Amino acid sequence: MPQLVLEHQRGACFGPCPIFLLRAFDDGSATLSLQKVFPEDRGVKLPIGDYQMQASNGHAKSLDSILKKSDRLDFQNLGGTYDNPMIMDLPSIRTRIRDAEVIDRYKGPGLESLYEAIELFILNGDWEIQTIENQ
């Protein structure tokens, strides 16, 4: 049975931030629950809904590159919450990789490149809408 290795959730902001929950598994399969779409300039046309991506070597390789990037960032040892409660319009970003979790609302250390890689995994994915039978 595939093991969950990445869970990435983006919350709301006052602007055009996408809102979603991504779960990716070690075989390259993934699920995506999209509650607010990506801005049009990102080039993806996924409407709001629940999606799945089948396991494949290509997806597994893309996921592996994200995991390697997290290793280079020493994600496992970042831990905790990065926040500034004095700033209101910040989306919350919760990322769990393997057994480590980071909650980032403000200045998580060096995480922008990791977020970009995760977003590319989503934007370049072969997503299929989930139907009742698939849930």
Image (tube, helix red, strand yellow):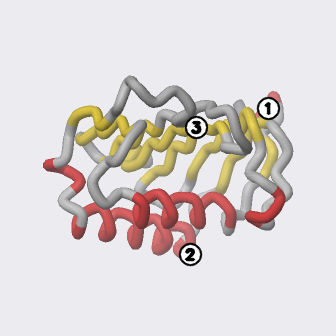
User: Pointer 3: what residue?
Assistant: 21
Marking on residue 60? none
User: Pointer 2: what residue?
Assistant: 58
Q: Residue at x 70, y 30 (%)?
A: 135
Please state if 59 lies on the left or on the right of 25 as rendered.
right
Which marked residue is nearer to the observer: mark 2 or mark 3? 3
Which marked residue is nearer to the observer: mark 1 or mark 2? 2
Q: Disc 2 versus disc 3: distance between alpha carbons?
A: 21 Å
What is the three-letter code of the residue carrying label 1? Glu
Task: For label 3, count other residues whose C-alpha is less than 10 Å away and answer few (under 14), some (14-19) or many (20+).
Answer: some
* Nearer-the-camera pick, 115 or 130: 115
Task: For label 1, count other residues whose C-alpha is less than 10 Å away and answer few (under 14), some (14-19) or many (20+).
Answer: few
Q: Position of residue 50 (x, y in %)?
A: 74, 37
What is the three-letter code of the residue carrying label 2? Gly
Q: Residue at x 70, y 40 (%)?
A: 15
What is the three-letter code of the residue carrying label 3? Leu
Give SS at disc 2: helix
User: Pointer 1: what residue?
Assistant: 133
